[in-house]
Image (cartoon, rainbow, N blue to C red):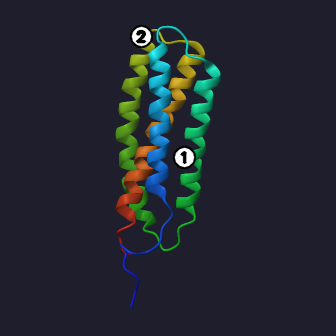
């Protein structure tokens, strides 16, 4: 008898992805609280590194899954990425339109990119994990 798709052991992708989203949210709120002045760069970069490390860990864990619906994962992730690239582009435009410049803009842009990449991975994983290969 084959293992149930619901009961099989998978890495904690959704939990790590949620932690990465929390780190990104904290980073954006922290930076936005200082606008139009600059937030302390060291704190903002530390939060950015934590979020990036969580997302890199997630991508590594997902890449190591055996017997996974990779075609469905790529399909869902691709369409989510298109949608979130549009959303991220609009938010980036708002940053630039509001005269956010320099290091502050770079940090916010990198956090926005992490947000844009995290959601497609979480959505695609959630769909693909329940598809039989």
Q: Which x, y percent locates residue 32?
A: 45, 18
At 40% from the left and 27% from the top, the residue drawn is: 89
Residue 28 vertical position relative to residue 126 in the rendered view, above or below: above
Closer to us: mark 1 or mark 2?
1
**In terms of image quadrants, where is residue 116?**
top left
Asked which secondary structure carries label 1, the reply is: helix
- Give the residue number, with chain letter if any, for mark 2: 98
Q: Nearer the viewer, residue 101 or 14?
A: 14
Task: State which tag comes first along the sequence, 1 or 2.
Answer: 1
- At 51% across and 24% down in the image, what residue appears? 108
| 85 up-or-down from 126: above or below | above
Q: Label 1, on which residue?
A: 55
The N terminus lies in quadrant: bottom left
Extreme residue toward the bottom, this view: 1
User: Few, some or many C-alpha atoms within 10 Å of disc 1 (few <14, some 14-19, many ≥20)?
Assistant: many
The image shows residue 133 at horizontal and vertical percentages of 41, 75
Would residue 15 be found to the left or right of residue 123 on screen? right
Q: Dot 2: what SS?
A: loop
Task: Report the Cα–Cα distance between label 1 and label 2.
Answer: 28 Å
């Amino acid at each position: 008898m084959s293992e149930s798709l619901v009961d099989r052991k998978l890495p904690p992708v959704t939990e790590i992805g949620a932690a990465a989203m929390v780190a990104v949210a904290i980073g954006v709120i922290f930076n936005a609280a200082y606008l139009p002045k600059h937030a302390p760069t060291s704190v903002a970069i530390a939060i950015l590194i934590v979020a990036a490390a969580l997302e890199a860990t997630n991508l590594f864990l997902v890449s190591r899954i055996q017997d996974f619906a990779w075609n469905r994962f790529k399909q869902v992730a691709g369409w989510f990425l298109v949608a979130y690239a549009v959303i991220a582009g609009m938010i980036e435009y708002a940053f630039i339109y509001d005269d956010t410049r320099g290091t502050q803009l770079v940090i916010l842009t990198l956090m926005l990119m992490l947000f844009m990449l995290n959601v497609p991975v979480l959505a695609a994983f959630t769909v693909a994990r329940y598809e039989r290969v």
